[in-house]
């Protein structure tokens, strides 16, 4: 596709459920990022992939959060045993060349945990 | 770690000029980014400054002073559609991963 695609756009989960959020980056983009954005806040870094390698996962808030990109293209962010504080928009971004500074963001997946 | 500070909210009049300031504290600075985010939409890239000085891109300009840990985004000839959140972000520590501030909500009124 022309841009970064994320699904689902909206997800409602009961506390304790597992969720999986998908990101389809722009074709050919080597770098892929996940960010978490709470209402009224800036995006908070979660994790970064270069191709299939997860080079930085320092932003993942707990071991309930797990991300993968097995073939260096599509990525999945999985949250186990969701808690209410996990409610946020999860943004995925991709980049062809980090030297340009330009990340292309998807519209995000809005997760609401009840 | 990084500390990025920008005003929470600003208001301005259509047709006017507004300057949104951002200060940052980092180690191993690798560049300063500005993104625009309309409510409920994805952030979109505006600028990336690595060297000191002013970079102009149409109605938007971005300035960086590395020695002062300071940047600003200048918006000229404001239009109603410029009402959005403006996110300042810095990369540091040998990484090019942007760390974002909380954003400045700009309200443009007639």
Image (cartoon, coloured by chain):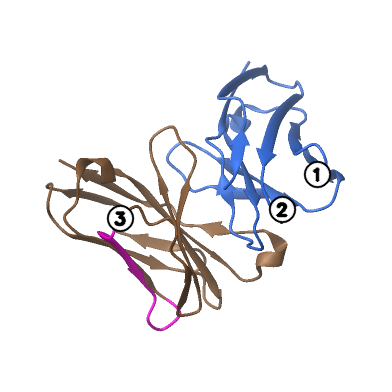
In the structure shown, which secondary structural element does the residue marked by tag 3 occupy?
A: loop
Tell me, yes or no, whether the two marked residues, 2 and 1, touch with CB atoms within 8 Å: yes
In-front residue for pair A80/B108: A80
Which of the two residues, B74 or A57, is positioned nearer the viewer here?
Answer: A57
Q: Which chain is blue?
A: B
Gap in angstroms between the C-alphas marked 2 and 1: 8 Å
Chain letter for mark 2, please. B
Chain containing mark 1: B
- Residue B59 found in image quarter: top right
Residue reaching furthest to the bottom:
A71
Neighbour class for label 2 at 10 Å: few (<14), some, many (≥20)? Answer: some
| Residue named by callout 3 | A62
Q: Colour of chain A?
A: brown
Question: Which is nearer the eye, B71 or A61?
Answer: A61
Residue B108 in view (yes/no): no
Q: Are marks 1 and 3 on the same chain?
A: no
* Nearer-N-terminus badge (2/1): 2
Q: Which residues are magenta?
A: A63-73
> In this picture, is A11 found above or below A55?
above
């Amino acid at each position: 596709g022309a841009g970064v695609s994320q699904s689902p756009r909206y997800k409602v989960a009961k506390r304790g459920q597992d969720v999986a959020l998908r990101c389809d980056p722009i074709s050919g983009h080597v770098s892929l990022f996940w960010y978490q954005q709470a209402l009224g806040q800036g995006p908070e870094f979660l994790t970064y992939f270069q191709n299939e390698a997860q080079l930085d996962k320092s932003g993942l808030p707990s071991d309930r959060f797990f991300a993968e990109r097995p073939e260096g293209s599509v990525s999945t962010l999985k949250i186990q045993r969701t808690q209410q504080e996990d409610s946020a928009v999860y943004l995925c971004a991709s980049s062809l060349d980090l030297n340009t500074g330009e990340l292309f963001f998807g519209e995000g997946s809005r997760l609401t945990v009840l | 770690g990084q500390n990025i500070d920008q005003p929470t909210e600003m208001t301005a009049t259509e047709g006017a000029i507004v300057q949104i300031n951002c200060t940052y504290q980092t180690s191993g600075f690798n560049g300063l980014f500005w993104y625009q985010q309309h409510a409920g939409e994805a952030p979109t890239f505006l600028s990336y400054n690595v060297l000191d000085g002013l970079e102009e891109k149409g109605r938007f300009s971005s300035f960086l002073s590395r020695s002062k840990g300071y940047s600003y985004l200048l918006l000229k000839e404001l239009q109603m559609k410029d009402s959005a959140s403006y996110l300042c972000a810095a990369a540091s520590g040998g990484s090019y991963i942007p760390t974002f501030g909380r954003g400045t909500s700009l309200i443009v009124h007639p």
